[in-house]
Amino acid sequence: MAEDTPVPCYLIRTDDGRVVLIDTGFAPAAVAATREPGYQGPPLRDYVSVVDQLPPLGVRPEDVDILVATHLDSDHAGMTDAFPNAEIVIQRAMYEAARAASHPRYAMTRAQWDAPGLRYRPVDGDTELAPGVTLIETGGHVPGHQSVLVRLPQTGPVLLAIDAVVSVGQADPETRERPQAARPGGARGGGPDRLRTRWPPVANPPAGPGVLRLMVIA
Ligand SMILES: [Zn+2]
């Protein structure tokens, strides 16, 4: 992971009162491991867990109605089990790939995303989640990766591309790099190319490390 790579989660309140959380960041144990003496991996700076960022927003974990799992990489699914009342919406291709394989990419946080009692709702392709919130299937980074298109009354459409567009170098639709193709657990095609053809103004809102972004749809 490149330095200064954010680990964003997003919180959406819909105008019918539902609380939608998108992704959950690293597992607590993974965060703790980065602070152990002798840790050799990339530093994790200014990281605050999504659970710890909710109270200032007046949200408790049990208030989250819908949890969008964009995909099950360790920096996105590490606290999936912390939201007891949430229905977890995931692309079926991602869910089945992760459950079927013992690939370390998904095994790293399996205890969290496959914890007993979690309620998953697999979806197939683009899905209207709530008025103004649409899931866009952008497989490529992994099978069944999904981005989230949010239509805000003041700002207009905002595309949370997540890992379909992982760097600034991919933000411009004209110069965007090709999708990551050969990563373990990944798949060719999809991802940024799909966003280029369908949603040219890709705008992963900037976020600092570990920043939870709040969006209000009203
Ligand atoms: Zn990822």
Image: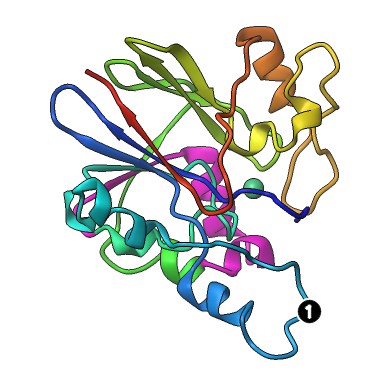
Seen in the picture, residue 138 relative to 209 is either above or below; the reply is above
Query: Which percent across, then down, holds residue 93?
Result: 55, 40
Q: Name the residue at 50% across, 41% down.
A: 70
Q: Name the residue at 23% across, 26% down.
A: 14
Disc 1 element: loop
Seen in the picture, residue 37 relative to 206 is either above or below; the reply is below
Query: Which percent across, then down, holds residue 102?
Result: 63, 67
Which picture quadrant has residue 201? top right
Neighbours of disc 1 within 10 Å: few (<14), some (14-19), many (20+):
few
Q: Nearer the viewer, residue 88 or 121?
A: 88
> What span is colored magenta in the figure?
84-109
Query: Which percent across, then down, holds residue 21?
Result: 34, 42
Q: Amino acid at mark 1?
A: Gln
Count up the numbered dots. Answer: 1
- Does 79 lie within the magenta span? no
In this figure, which residue is indicated by the disc labeled 1?
A: 40
Q: Name the residue at 46% across, 62% down.
A: 48
Q: Is mark 1 within 8 Å of ligand 1?
A: no
Query: Which percent across, then down, holds residue 80?
Result: 39, 58
- Does 95 lie within the magenta span? yes
Seen in the picture, residue 77 relative to 11 is either above or below; the reply is below
Q: Which color scheme does this rendered protein use?
A: rainbow
Q: Nearer the viewer, residue 178 or 208?
A: 208
Quadrant where the C terminus lies? top left
Q: In the rendered view, does 192 fall on the left or right side of 57?
A: right
Seen in the picture, residue 207 relative to 56 is either above or below; the reply is above
